[in-house]
Image (tube, grey):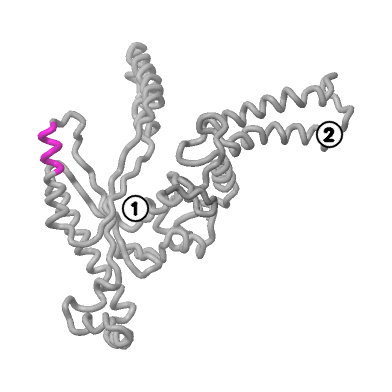
Amino acid sequence: MDDHNPAKRIPKSLGTDTKLLGSYTMTDLAVALFPGVVVVLCVQVLLPAGMTIQGHQVQTLALPLAGVMIGLGALFVYLTPAYTTSADWVTSMVSFHSRATDSDHEAAKEYTRIERVYPRRNAIERTDGAVFGLVQVIPPTMALATDEEWAQKAESFQDFLNTTVEFPIQIYSTTQPFPVDDHLARYEARLDDPDVEANPQLEALIENYVAWYEAELDERRMTIRDHYVVVPVTPAEVRFDDASLAEQLAAVPVLGLVVRELYAPREAAEREALIDELDDRLDRVRAGIRGINGCTAHRLDATEATKVIGEYWSDESMEYGQLEQVLRTRGIVGGPDR
């Protein structure tokens, strides 16, 4: 039996507005009209009534300008991504562009969860006490590979995960712009060589190649993809010997607090054990990846790893100069002016 009591009705969805046309709502209409309303209010309230611009009354220009702004507002609504609303998108954009781009050291630590860097041990410590390192993976070129070759690589990677990785890892892939200037600098330098200057055809060939290559890369937006394996070690994994009595007692409520206080290693010893375990895990990951045909891998030192982490959080390529010295004087996030 149908229950027509409005108090007991369950809506099919929450947070939805009344649809005016298709998927567009009253909120979308308000966002589209808002720029035009602002123009009209500014003209009516802020500007003198008799104000003219090149002989034209400002009042007569208000409506055409408001129409243009409403058109821009409607375009903004039309371009709003499907996963959000136009009002939320406006809020997100304003919030993003109004936020400070620099953070002090404590704020950066809270944001990135990075406590400190150990340059001599090539390790980075998180604020929760865990340490981690990065292994960069250079895969083989698979552009012309067959389905069988792809299947072999996938099977080899599966074996690596099943046999070598007995601990948590993260796989991080990113891109960086192709160094066009560095690549073309070699050809541009040839233009100053005596043999090229004495050969107009060769000089023209190099100039045409440089111009073509710049235009080609700009059209293709070529980038370089980098792959990293992030390997962490937490204090809980090295605090006690595996399967020891102390480890079992540490899990007991109340009593575990006393056991951890009495038998847990001191901070310096614990940090040393963490980094030693990290070294072992990184070596195993590196060796396992090298076991995949065509793959090479190497561990990043602290300087390179810090640069990768900094660019991840800042979302842009950053130049620090002598980064080994910067690690002692600047935070990871904030740019070279920090």
**Residue labelled with disc 2:** 47
- The percent coordinates of residue 231 (x first, y second) are 27, 59
- The percent coordinates of residue 20 (x first, y second) are 57, 32
Circle 2 SS class: loop
The part of the image, by quadrant, that contains residue 63 is top right
**Residue labelled with disc 1:** 304
Query: Taking 114 as reference, is 337 left or right?
Result: right
**CA–CA distance in space, label 1 to label 2:** 57 Å
Residue drawn at x 84%, y 22% is: 57
Magenta segment: does it hold 148?
yes
Q: Main secondary structure of the magenta part?
A: helix
Residue drawn at x 37%, y 51% is: 308
Residue drawn at x 43%, y 52% is: 313
- The percent coordinates of residue 122 (x first, y second) are 30, 61
- Amino acid, disc 1: Glu
Range shown magenta = 147-154
Q: Which mark is residue 81?
A: none
Q: How many numbered tags mark residues here? A: 2
- How busy is the neighbourhood of tag 2: few (under 14 within 10 Å), some, or many (20 plus)? few
- The percent coordinates of residue 315 (x first, y second) are 44, 46
Foreground residue among 75 and 301: 75
The part of the image, by quadrant, that contains residue 31 is top right
Using the image, determine if residue 324 lies above or below residue 70. Answer: below
Using the image, determine if residue 97 lies above or below residue 189. Answer: below
Q: Earlier in the sequence, mark 1 or mark 2?
A: 2
Circle 1 SS class: helix
Indicate which label's residue lies in the foreground, 1 or 2: 2
- Amino acid, disc 2: Leu
Query: Taking 163 as reference, is 179 left or right?
Result: right
